[in-house]
């Protein structure tokens, strides 16, 4: 989808619903420097969802969609889980894969897009939960990294199977007791960021979605590094507030508590030398563009 495709015929404009007119007038497709602060105007990407009230996944979804470098040229590959409740309401091309094979689907998709559109970049982003990424789909996840496939993998880490009643997952905390894991987890949380690093990912981040600036930066870096160099991985803590016994407004507090000093979601980042050089180049270009914009504004003010 692009801004051109959502335009309204001038002869029909006055009879179109005001909600559609608003989307067309305020669409952020193609906006330079667009990011999480544009969420209120990014209605062409996502306006509503069917997740629970206060769900941290809904927060992460909005930040991620607003931070995509080129949403109109991006294809998401999702999997069974809570995320599959949102994708039908997202105005970005997406594929619903079978549970666990999302990275295999993304591999074929990325390669096909490179053949079909050799002169244009088409980004592929995998977004799935911990069950699809680390449990059922770990083989296909790791194999895509081994092969150096050029797409980003994002894991929404609920630390359990949130969509089917609270079963234990490999990313659940040791000792945690849930409704369908009454004995408690008997082994430590699988260290998937470390596995991603050792499996060949060039940019790896573990974080929560409590800090939008940080999410935006990580998503942009991950997508650009995947375009130019190789696989990238982001693991975001999106706790299921219902399954961990929290109120609908306590999701943000839960994330902040988990990322404090010594917390299990303290921000971690791994960057290869090649990825670091690319990110520095992008940061320098962004600073230069901002400086030029300020100078232009000053000159216009004086004129």
Image (cartoon, rainbow, N blue to C red):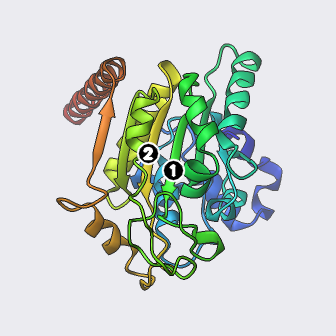
- Residue at 51% across / 50% down in the picture? 155
Q: Quadrant of the C terminus?
A: top left
Can you identify the residue that label 2 sits on? 192
**Residue 222 found in image quarter:** top left
Query: How many labels were placed on the picture?
Result: 2
Left or right: residue 290 versus residue 105 is left
- Residue at 72% across / 30% down in the picture? 109
In the depicted structure, whether residue 18 falls above or below residue 165: above
Q: Which of the two residues, 278 or 231, is positioned nearer the viewer here?
A: 231
| Cβ atoms under marks 2 and 1 closer than 8 Å | yes
How far across and down, in percent of the image, does residue 128 sit?
59, 52
User: SS for tag 1?
Assistant: strand
User: SS for tag 2?
Assistant: helix
**Residue 14 found in image quarter:** bottom right
In the depicted structure, whether residue 11 falls above or below residue 105: below
Query: As drawn, which residue projects farthest toward the top?
Result: 119
Residue 17 seen in the current view: yes
Can you identify the residue that label 1 sits on? 155
How far across and down, in percent of the image, does residue 85 sit?
68, 65
Left or right: residue 282 versus residue 126 is left
Q: Quadrant of the N terminus?
A: top right
Q: Which of the two residues, 84 or 158, is positioned nearer the viewer here?
A: 158
How far across and down, in percent of the image, does residue 139 sit?
61, 39
How far across and down, in percent of the image, does residue 256 sit?
28, 67
Q: Residues within 10 Å of mark 2 (few under 14, many from 20)?
A: many
Q: Which of the two residues, 167 or 106, is positioned nearer the viewer here?
A: 167
- Residue at 65% across / 62% down in the picture? 81
**Residue 188 found in image quarter:** bottom left
**Res 172 label:** none
Q: Please name which of the two marks, 2 or 1, marks the residue nearer to the observer.
A: 2
Earlier in the chain: of badge 2 and badge 1, it is 1
Q: CA distance from mark 2 to mark 1?
A: 10 Å
């Amino acid at each position: 989808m692009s801004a051109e495709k959502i335009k309204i015929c001038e002869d029909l404009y006055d009879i179109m619903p005001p909600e559609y007119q608003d989307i067309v007038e305020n669409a952020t497709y193609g906006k330079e420097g667009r990011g999480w602060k544009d969420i209120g105007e990014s209605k062409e990407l996502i306006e509503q969802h069917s997740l629970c009230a206060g769900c941290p996944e809904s927060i992460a979804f909005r930040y991620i969609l607003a931070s995509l470098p080129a949403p109109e040229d991006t294809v998401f590959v999702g999997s069974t889980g809570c995320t599959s409740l949102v994708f039908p309401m997202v105005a970005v091309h997406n594929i619903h894969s079978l549970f666990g094979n999302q990275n295999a689907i993304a591999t074929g998709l990325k390669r096909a897009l490179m053949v079909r559109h050799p002169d244009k970049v088409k980004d592929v982003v995998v977004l799935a939960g911990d069950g699809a990424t680390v449990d059922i789909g770990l083989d296909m996840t790791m194999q895509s990294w081994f092969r150096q496939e050029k797409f980003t993998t994002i894991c929404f880490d609920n630390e359990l199977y949130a969509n089917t009643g609270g079963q234990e997952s490999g990313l659940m905390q040791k000792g945690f007791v849930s409704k369908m894991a009454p004995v408690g987890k008997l082994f430590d949380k699988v260290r998937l960021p470390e596995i991603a690093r050792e499996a060949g990912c060039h940019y790896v981040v573990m974080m929560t979605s409590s800090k939008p600036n940080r999410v935006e930066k990580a998503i942009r870096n991950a997508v650009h590094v995947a375009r130019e160099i190789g696989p990238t991985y982001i693991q975001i803590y999106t706790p299921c507030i219902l399954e961990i016994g929290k109120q609908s407004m306590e999701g943000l507090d839960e994330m902040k508590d988990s990322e404090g000093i010594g917390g299990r979601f303290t921000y971690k980042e791994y960057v290869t030398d090649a990825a670091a050089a690319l990110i520095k180049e992008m940061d320098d270009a962004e600073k230069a563009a901002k400086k030029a914009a300020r100078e232009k504004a000053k000159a216009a003010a004086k004129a």
